[in-house]
């Protein structure tokens, strides 16, 4: 009986770990999408004359840092 419970516990822990990994991936994808949106908004504002090159560069740097840390998978989805 304890063998069955051990296997059930292992399966539950594995499922929990997979679920946590998926949640982390979704959160990183959302963060990347938000940074990409902010870059677009900064660029648009700069082109319209209401933004600055510094704001665009800052948004680009934040996006590049996110890509360095988490990859660019969100760009392909």
Image (cartoon, helix red, strand yellow):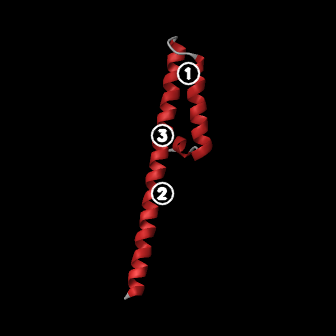
For disc 1, the marked residue is 55
Cα distance in 3D space between marks 3 and 2: 15 Å
| Outermost front residue | 2
Packing grade of label 2 (10 A; few <14, some 14-19, many >=20) is few
- Residue for point 50% across, 17% down: 45
Where does the image place residue 63, in percent across and percent down from the top left? 57, 35
Where does the image place residue 13, in percent across and percent down from the top left? 43, 69
Packing grade of label 1 (10 A; few <14, some 14-19, many >=20) is some
Cα distance in 3D space between marks 3 and 1: 18 Å
Cα distance in 3D space between marks 1 and 2: 33 Å
Left-right relation of 60 to 11: right
Left-right relation of 32 to 2: right
Where does the image place residue 53, in percent across and percent down from the top left? 59, 18
Q: Nearer the viewer, residue 1 or 18?
A: 1
Packing grade of label 3 (10 A; few <14, some 14-19, many >=20) is some
For disc 2, the marked residue is 21
Residue 76 appears in the figure: yes
Where does the image place residue 72, in percent across and percent down from the top left? 58, 43
- Residue for point 54% across, 16% down: 46
- Residue for point 62% across, 42% down: 68
| Outermost bottom residue | 1
Number of numbered labels in the structure image:
3
Residue 71 appears in the figure: no
For disc 3, the marked residue is 31
Q: Where the N terminus falls, by quadrant?
A: bottom left
Taking 11 as reference, is 29 above or below it?
above
Taking 19 as reference, is 42 above or below it?
above
Of the residues under marks 3 and 2, which one precedes in the sequence?
2
Q: Nearer the viewer, residue 31 or 49?
A: 31
Of the residues under marks 1 and 2, which one precedes in the sequence?
2
Q: Secondary structure at mark 3?
A: helix
């Amino acid at each position: 009986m304890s063998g069955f419970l051990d296997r059930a516990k292992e399966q539950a822990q594995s499922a929990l770990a997979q679920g946590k990994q998926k949640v982390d991936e979704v959160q990183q994808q959302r963060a990347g999408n938000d940074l990409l949106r902010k870059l677009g908004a900064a660029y648009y504002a700069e082109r319209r004359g209401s933004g600055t090159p510094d704001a665009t560069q800052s948004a680009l740097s934040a996006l590049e840092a996110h890509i360095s840390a988490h990859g660019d998978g969100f760009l392909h989805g």
